Amino acid sequence: MSLAQLLPLAPLLLLAAAPVVTLLASAFSRSPRVVFAATLGLLAATLATLPLSLTALPMDVTSLLRLDGFGLFLLALLGLGGLVVACLADDTWQRRPTARADRFYPLLLFALAGMGVAVLAADFASFFLGLETLTVSLYGLLGFTRHRQAALEGGLKYLVLAAASTAFLLFGLALLYAAAGTLQLAELGPRLLAVGGGTGLDPQVGLGLGLILVAFGFKLALVPFHLIFPELYQSAPPPVAALLAAGSKGAIFAALARFLALSGLTAVPSVVTWLAFFAALTMTVGNLAALRQGSLRRLLAYSSVAHVGYLLLALLALPQGGLAALLGYLAIYGATVLVLFGGIGLLAADGQEADRIDELTGLAQTRPLLAGLLALALLSLTGVPLTAGFVAKLLLFTAAFDAGHHWLVGLAAANSVLSAFYYLRVVIVLYRPGPPARTTWPRASRLAVATLVLLGAFLLLGGLLPDPLVQLVRVASQGLGGAP
Amino acid sequence: MLTLLLLVPAAGGLAAWLVGRRAADAPRKLALLTLLVQLGLLLLVGQEPARFGTESPLLEQQHPWIPSLGISYHLALDGLGLVLLSLTVFLALAAVLTAWREIREREGGFYGLLLLLVCGLTGVFLAVDLVLFYLFWEVMLLPKFFLLRYWGGPGRVRAAWRFLLYTFGGGLVLLLAILGLHLAVRQTTGVATFDLPALLPAAPGGELGLVLFAGFFLGFAVKLPVFPLHGWLADAHAEAPLASVVLGGAMLKAGGFGLIRFALPLFPAAALHLQPLVLGLGVATILYGGLLACAATDLRRIAAYASLAGMGFVLLGIGAGNELGLQGAVVGMVAHGLIAGALFALWVVLRAQTGTLALDGLGGLWHRAPRLSGFTLFFALAALGLPGLAGFVGEFLVLLGTFRVSPAAAALAVGGLVISAVFALRLVQRTVHGPLRVTRPVTDLAWPERVVLGLFALLLLLFGLHPQPLLDASQAPLAQVARTLAAGEPQPPVEDHPEVAP
């Protein structure tokens, strides 16, 4: 392989090398700041080399990975998201000294590398590898604050659950492989359809797909597989919760979208029915449950469940506008969630993050900037015009409407009304007059605040001038959606 | 120029919010100043009478905004928009002046939100691109919600959520209808656009048109509001800070405006098909609102239900769909805005003086406060449609227009006039006549209040005796809508007849 061929792979190689390098760095220097700086540098380098790949698109990296516009866009998102999470984590560990905070960053980078592999996977085998790398890192990350009972418990529960869902996934894959003789995403679909004789799905294939759907259901927190997630969000350190909500779900979703788009399975009526069923159930149950939460992080967990329900609409709109809508939604939703969990992370006092919504009463009086950012993010999640969230919903609804899912879009719109109730309730609490629940908050690091301000600016700009973003996701989704 | 009309209130609102932290009384002065500037701008725009009577907009501005989605930043001001914009600014000024004494806490936020509301309303009256319109439609909703939630009366929490549920829900129905229209047009013409002029000729008819029209109608009817979608109105009016209700009158007009500007021209065939239903809802709204106003025991609720009845007339005029009816609807919107605004401004004073707005606690004010009572009588008479005042002109035109389409609906609506006489006179009788029940010492109106209320009265009288300017300004766009409806399909604008250049 010549250098010219290797250059486009630079971002991938850097992303894969990053965890190893930081692990070595932490072996030489126990200072979390050194490892943190290395993390930032490696992620920045990954992002900086992304343009090198542009000219070579689309490119097959062995038969396992495929680098195309879709994947490259997601890699960029992962890199940016990783930077943000690292900055937030730096703030958290500075204020809450934890033994061996330097170990956090290699774990984070392992998770990112896993996600990177998952979003580029052209084969279920490589997808599985990426997914497992991600999941194993997440066990460590979720339980990273070892002295905390809840966090440790959360990590263990996730371990059990993830192992179970992995079993489902493997069994499903085995059934598909037995039927089709390949795990290549692009070939799998047509062969599976051929096994069914063109009239529908073969029972064995149906069972396999069903098992895979269950596995994805666990990972994505589809209702009724969502029950563990609120607890995880509550117990995990906020930067990890942000990673879980924005990163891991997004990456797995993207991989699912790639499979469905390439396989042509979205043309099969029963698949459509099941996806529509889960979309309707997930968004409705998520929103209804979020209405009654007193804990901000549980509220966000259920809201995230609801948003996954909306995102399923994008899968139903494949391949027309669905991929672009998916990418746009992931970018915007990811930024919003990072602002929210980042904000919560900054609001830690006495080693304990703010959790109950009441604790934030009158935050606007003591920390106006942070309250403003949180309010902006909440309005964006509601889908209020002039915020990026509106553009995301517009893209999604248009795509799904276009694909003919009128009733589901109607249901999603009704759900948006419902969601306004709990999002705005928090906004109201933030700006409630009268004595604030807490007058002093610990100082946050400038870096973390600056990160959040940048994300907030993205949410505003994305709402005011969304054209570049829309064009970008369109172009990025071309490579995959247009491919045969 | 049009952008300036949007920027001025937005910037003023932001500034008012920011200075509110430093000086307590700066926000209201700033708000007043902002609105005066806005008024000046509108007067400048209205300086071009030569262009009234043409069917092209007075001013227009178009830039691509999100070209990849077919969304443009397209603003246009026609005569109708100008009339309603002027009303908005006038009401906003009155709102600031009445809030001058009523609102004493967190003024920065209050005036900031109030001006943001003005910005949203201005955008609604200007936007021609449907997504842009929807955007301002929502911008209008949130400030109102927060005003209600933070500065409202004891029942504010419930009222605010109820308001949000109705209007946000209505808004999303509207958004779905807009998306549906967009996609339908894209399928037939291959052009992805949200721009009204481009959508007009290609808007679908038939069953799809009917569904989309219903979506638009629902979205606007919630705002108007129309029976049975009026559940939020009374609570919102009764619990909101009264000063914001003065402006709230302008918000109801946005619903009527939307129907005239978007729903009717886009789906004329569907509008004709559903005409009996629309007329029926109009009549039901008139009668139901009137009856509730007769039964209410709180001045705020009486005024709110009177608003409902007034909006019934507006809907009736729109449903009739001929030029007379539409003009009646527009005059009715202006008149109602003025009457409701004046009544709520009056209630602010009344509550400050007597400490109550319940009918049981009032009475016999005439001797103590003749001016206050005189104004109450005047505006109550305006509400019942006394000839010579603007309300009468609107109702009369609406009835004329309706009679041509459906004599039965017109006859029933006349019954609404009788009911309005009952509640208006009951209001006067229980408030200013009878034994004095107010225990506090009551002083009469101070001069700033006299000026504000006097202006309201003057305008009502002016438009009642000489409504021609109002009719002239809005005639051209309304005539086009009426022609579209008569033909049952979109009509191109009539060629302009430019005056000989001086």
Image: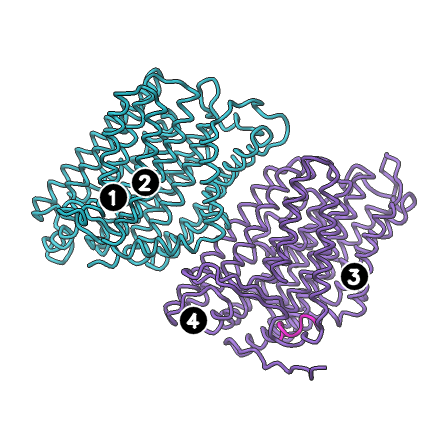
Chain colours: A cyan, B purple
Which region shows up in magenta? Answer: B473-479
Which residue is label 4 attached to? B206
Q: Is residue A458 visible?
A: yes
Residue in the picture at 38% in, 42% down: A307
Which residue is label 1 attached to? A119
Q: Picture coordinates of residue A7 (x, y %)? A: 22, 46
Q: Amino acid at mark 3?
A: Leu
Mark 2 nearby-residue class (10 Å; few <14, some 14–19, many ≥20): many
Q: Picture coordinates of residue B102 (x, y %)? A: 75, 40
Choose the circle earlier in sequence order: 4 or 3: 4
Mark 1 nearby-residue class (10 Å; few <14, some 14–19, many ≥20): many
Q: Amino acid at mark 2?
A: Leu
Mark 1 lies on a secondary structure that is helix
Mark 2 lies on a secondary structure that is helix
Q: Are marks 1 and 4 in contact (CB under 8 Å)?
A: no
Callout 4: chain: B
Q: Are marks 3 and 2 in contact (CB under 8 Å)?
A: no
Q: Are marks 3 and 1 in contact (CB under 8 Å)?
A: no
Mark 4 to mark 2: distance in Å? Answer: 48 Å
Q: Quadrant of residue B367?
A: top right
Which residue is label 2 attached to? A78
Mark 4 lies on a secondary structure that is helix
Residue in the picture at 65% in, 41% down: B17
Q: Is residue A293 visible?
A: no
Mark 1 to mark 2: distance in Å? Answer: 10 Å
Q: Are marks 4 and 3 in contact (CB under 8 Å)?
A: no
- The correct choice, above or below, for B322 with respect to B165 in the image is below
